[in-house]
Amino acid sequence: MRSVLVAGGVALLVTLFGTRFAIQLLVKRGYGQFIRDDGPTTHHTKRGTPTMGGGVVIGSVVLAYILAHLIVWTPPTASGLLALGLFTGLGLVGLADDWSKISHARSLGLRAWMKLSLQGVIAIAFAILAFQFPDARGVTPASQAISFLRDLPWAWLPMPVAVVWLVFLAAAWSNAANLTDGLDGLATGAAAMVFAAYGIVNLWQFNQSCASLTPGPQCYEVRDPHDLALVALAMAGACFGFLWWNASPAKIFMGDTGSLALGGGLAALSVFTRTELLMVIMAGLFVIITMSVVLQVGWFKVTRGKRLFKMAPLQHHFELMGWAEVTIVTRFWIICGLCVAAGLGLFYAQWVAGQ
């Protein structure tokens, strides 16, 4: 438990104090955000705000993980390293996208096919490695079953299909986080709640692990739950610390560097905790915002030019309706909190019902 608290505390402090220096450095070099001309006009005042702040979030999580293991002198685990690998790898794809925007002085970034290809390469490597490294009991970080609160016994997938499923999850969650990152502090605050909740889930799985208890129907067949709790709390702490500077009016944006990394963290935790479909509830805000884009595009094509929302993603629809940015963010955080509470409630209720 000490290492988990150390990781969360270190990540929070590094982003809380380190982001200030990142802002100064980025301003000095002129690495500011470019704003789309077709977006809400209120965003034009944000032009030039430092971006790529997600690099501080990534660095703080990695540093926190290393220091936590050094302090208690325990080796890292396969699950922890793979989760950090997906988190960092997708963050580097986002960094390349952000750098393309800055270097070419435009808001488009990498071409869509290039960005998706890079995400695919990272996700495929993660998916293949996630089925390696069995522990003494033969449990690998990921399983071949689709999971909800646990692995679903009737949803066992052949290995090639299981790899494709993990790739889909990594791509889906990274892009969902990217779409959610549209207003000051929105994605950062929402992700902090989900990661903190997964810290609780992982600690519960550690206390009820089949590795330490007599194997039974209610123990959790999850590899390295304690180290995953460490990773989850480090991510939550990093988001909380960064939120100090990212809350409205934002002094810095995380950019695609941060949003893709956060999505990678969500995907990895859902896979390794055997709660892939539960994440749809826990991170329900991300799902709602993503579905608004899907519905907007689908409706536009079906009706040949009509729009379902004034603008997608959903947060911009409410901006164009006249809602203040702080109002939208606060209300969306409330929705996220309700989703997290519902997810934790389901997770615990399933365990209680089986007793």
Image (tube, rainbow, N blue to C red):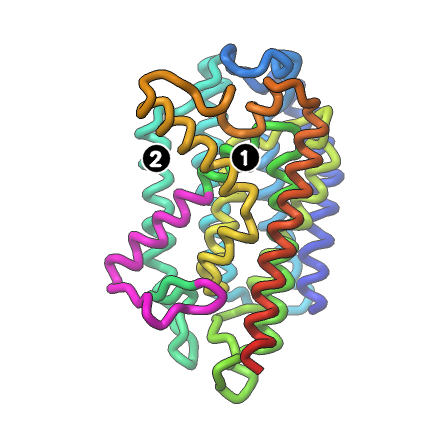
Residue 163's place in the image compared with 307, above or below, is: below
Q: Dot 1 corresponds to which residue? A: 180
Residue 324's place in the image compared with 160, above or below, is: above
Residue sitting at the far front: 303
Horizontally, residue 303 falls left or right of residue 241, namely: left
Measuring 42% from the left and 81% from the top, which residue is drawn there? 137
Quarter of the rendering occupied by the C terminus? bottom right
For label 1, the SS is: helix
For label 2, the SS is: helix
Q: Earlier in the sequence, mark 2 or mark 1?
A: 2
C-alpha distance separating marks 2 and 1 = 18 Å
The span shown in magenta is 148-173
Magenta-drawn stretch contains 156:
yes
* Label ID, residue 116: 2
Of the pair 12 and 324, the residue shown nearer to us: 324
Measuring 36% from the left and 72% from the top, which residue is drawn there? 153
